[in-house]
């Protein structure tokens, strides 16, 4: 695999860890407030990521980060937090086998948003893949 396709390894890693997130989250949120569960998860993430950045020596001065970066990372953080709150509540209320796949409807939505707001190219394989994800979510929700 060449460096141009290294993203596939990380994307597959993301999918694997997201699957574990669903299973561990479902087990962890049982019998507790889903918002508190999300908070605990967030604290663990902060500690783990801070440890990785420290071990790799990747800390930077905040003043070196452009304001545009701060704004969009803050907005991304807000969106992530709201997504996690919804996700954990959904896991608390529904089966992981339905919640996790419907959550991945975000992939189809990201395709549309990428085309509309970022000017990304919509190819046939991407369009068909997005439509299949949409169709799968509809089947899971409806039946």
Image: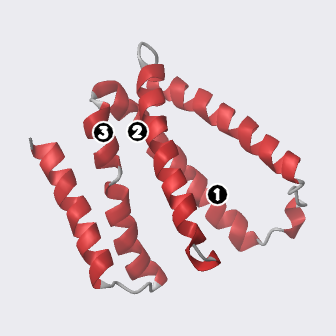
Name the spot of residue 74 as percent of width and height, x first.
64, 57
Q: Are marks 1 and 2 in contact (CB under 8 Å)?
A: no
**Disc assigned to residue 87:** 2
- Location of the N terminus (image quadrant): bottom right
Judge the density around disc 2: few (<14), some (14-19), many (≥20) Cα neighbours within 10 Å.
Answer: many
The vertical placement of 127 against 43, above or below, is below
Name the spot of residue 46 as percent of width and height, x first.
71, 39
Judge the density around disc 3: few (<14), some (14-19), many (≥20) Cα neighbours within 10 Å.
Answer: many
Side of 31 where 129 appears, left or right: left
Mark 1–mark 3 distance (CA, rounded to whole Å)? 26 Å
The vertical placement of 109 against 91, above or below, is below
For marks 2 and 3, give the one nearer the viewer: 3
| SS under mark 2 | helix
Which residue carries the number 1 mark? 74
Furthest-front residue in view? 1
| SS under mark 1 | helix
């Amino acid at each position: 695999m060449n460096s141009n396709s290294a993203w596939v390894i990380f994307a597959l890693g993301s999918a694997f860890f997201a699957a574990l997130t669903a299973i561990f989250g479902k087990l962890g949120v049982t019998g507790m407030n889903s918002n508190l569960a999300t908070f605990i998860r967030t604290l663990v993430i902060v500690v783990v990521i801070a440890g990785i950045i420290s071990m790799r020596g990747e800390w930077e001065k905040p003043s070196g980060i452009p304001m545009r970066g701060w704004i969009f990372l803050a907005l991304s953080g807000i969106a992530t937090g709201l997504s996690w709150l919804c996700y954990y509540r959904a896991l608390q209320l529904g089966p992981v086998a339905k919640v996790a796949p419907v959550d991945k409807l975000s992939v189809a939505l990201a395709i549309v948003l990428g085309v509309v707001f970022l000017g990304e190219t919509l190819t046939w394989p991407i369009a068909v893949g997005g439509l299949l994800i949409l169709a799968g979510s509809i089947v899971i929700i409806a039946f």
